[in-house]
Image (cartoon, rainbow, N blue to C red):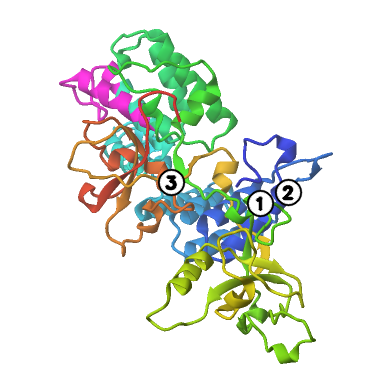
Amino acid sequence: MALTSPALWPNERNWPRAMQLWQQATEMGHWKAAMMWVQTAQNGAGLNSVKGQFAVPRQDSEEVVKQVEQMMRQGVADGFYLMGRFHDTGYGVKRNVDRAWALWELAADLGSARAQTQIAKVLNAASDDPKGAWWGNKKIALKMLECSYAQGYGAAAYELGSTLNRAASHGRNPDLTPISDANSQFTRALRILHDAVKFGSEDAAGSLLTAFDDGSPLVKGMVDKARAERYGAIGDALFNNPDLRFPNLDKVLPLTPAKLPKWDGKPDTLINAAKGVRVTPQQQDSSASQCPTTHRAYVPPSAMLEVPNHLARMPVLPGFTNVLAERPGSTGLARAQIAGYWQAKLVPVTPNESSFVASLRRDLSNLPPLRFEEGERMQLTRGNSNLPHEDQTHYLVEWHFAGRPVPMQTPQDWLAKAGTVRTIEAATDLYCTGEKHCPATGIWQPQLLDAQHPLHAQTGIAMFSEAWKWQAFVQAGQSMPSLQQLGLPLEDPQVHWRLMQATELGFAV
């Protein structure tokens, strides 16, 4: 996804390499990767330029259909939705609209938000008169939109919010019955459209820009150019990068009657502050890299010591060798069997160790592994501590092979590289249950309590979880948000909330 991110220039997006990776992930059972492969293979993508040969032509429709059939065998709801699209257009199969609608209905029953929204938009637009040429069903359409909205699908949230807004403007409920309280319906429509912006709907951002710019009934006639400008900036960002999501939008663009925090007017400031945050391991230089490069303890920056498999059973060397085996005048110090880093440790001693041995133990505990070449005499480095005389000390020392330096492998956070999430070094240890009021202002993330729940891994703080999508900016003293409002299909007692980052209302990150 990072290789083809909209954050890159079109001539820098490496679609061929991305297709290879999606195919690998598909073979390992990753259905979202299969979706990306199918959509790219069906339409083609990319271009060739001086930056590289990055174009992927349209693939054979038969191969695309086979891939979707495999998704259907896996029970992937969106696989049935795509196959419905194929039957609707005749792509790779014989066109059959009846079969297309049957597949969409099946996909909707399986939970496909795309299929639910597809059906709902048609049923919502049509007449409820069974004698009409096109018979709709607004009640079913609204139920499907509610279900899809509850999954955090931006297109459904936009359609649902717009439906409520249009109906209230005509003094009706969305099912066309007379309305009793238009204000409450406008309020809910505004909330849903605001959520649609969080879910990545450019259309919703444009709708709210217009509402606040004109002072429409949706916003109770209030003209608010500042809010309109911010929704406009969000909409522009989504136009350029549809992958963006803004779970913490309330931090920089809260709904009325909350006051807007100050903004420097830079779009990037607004966008970054509204993104989800994710704990991403940062590559750290080893402490030994702070030593002078000539010191035996020096380890190159961003490297760690590792013992190769074939050297895992390297014998421990006594600190003092048999003097009789050495040439005359030798000190008797051991020699390194291979080049690398060796750790000096104290040999086992009696429980009633002397003060001299206790002092040596403390000294050695602070001594890092030391670098020696093959055949080089191994002696403790003078000057590190008040070590006793070398010859006397080495009788109590043994040397353990500690390895050789290898580059530290820090996992890559590709979403962060693509600009979809903002990275933080660590989450806090503050928790809150959903029934309580928020104890501290900041970005909160729900976590499932049941480790056996199929969504447990997705709501953890591990780097590759998707829990950042369900974060919320909550101020101290406020109620924790409803999970359904965030697009997470869980009951509130099933989770607790973790404070990912303490931050006040505004743009400080």
Compared to 202, does 51 lie above or below?
below
State the separation of the CA atoms marked 3 and 2. Answer: 39 Å
- Identify residue for label 1: 41
The question of residue 298 being in magenta is answered with no
Q: Position of residue 158 (x, y in %)?
A: 40, 30
**In front of the other: 403 or 473:** 403
Tell me, yes or no, if residue 27 can be seen here. yes
Q: Which mark is residue 426?
A: 3
**Numbered circle sitting on residue 304:** none
Q: Is residue 379 above or below residue 284?
A: below
Horizontally, residue 337 falls left or right of residue 354, namely right
Q: Residue furthest left?
A: 180
Query: Going from the N terminus, do you reach mark 3 or mark 2 first?
Result: 2
Q: Amino acid at mark 2?
A: Val
Residue at screen point 41% across, 53% down: 107
In which image quadrant can residue 119 be found?
top left
Q: Which residues are magenta?
A: 167-195
Task: Compare marks 3 and 1 and give the one earlier in the sequence.
Answer: 1
Q: Is residue 386 above or below residue 182?
A: below
- The quadrant of the rendering that contains the C terminus is top left
Q: Position of residue 438 (x, y in %)?
A: 24, 36
User: Disc 3 or disc 2, which is closer to the eye?
Assistant: 3
The residue carrying pointer 3 sits among few (fewer than 14), some (14 to 19) or many (20 or more) residues within 10 Å by Cα, namely some
Q: Callout 2: 10 Å neighbours few (<14), some, many (20+)?
A: many
Q: Which residue is mark 2?
A: 56
Q: Secondary structure at mark 2?
A: loop
Marks 1 & 2, CB-CB < 8 Å contact: yes
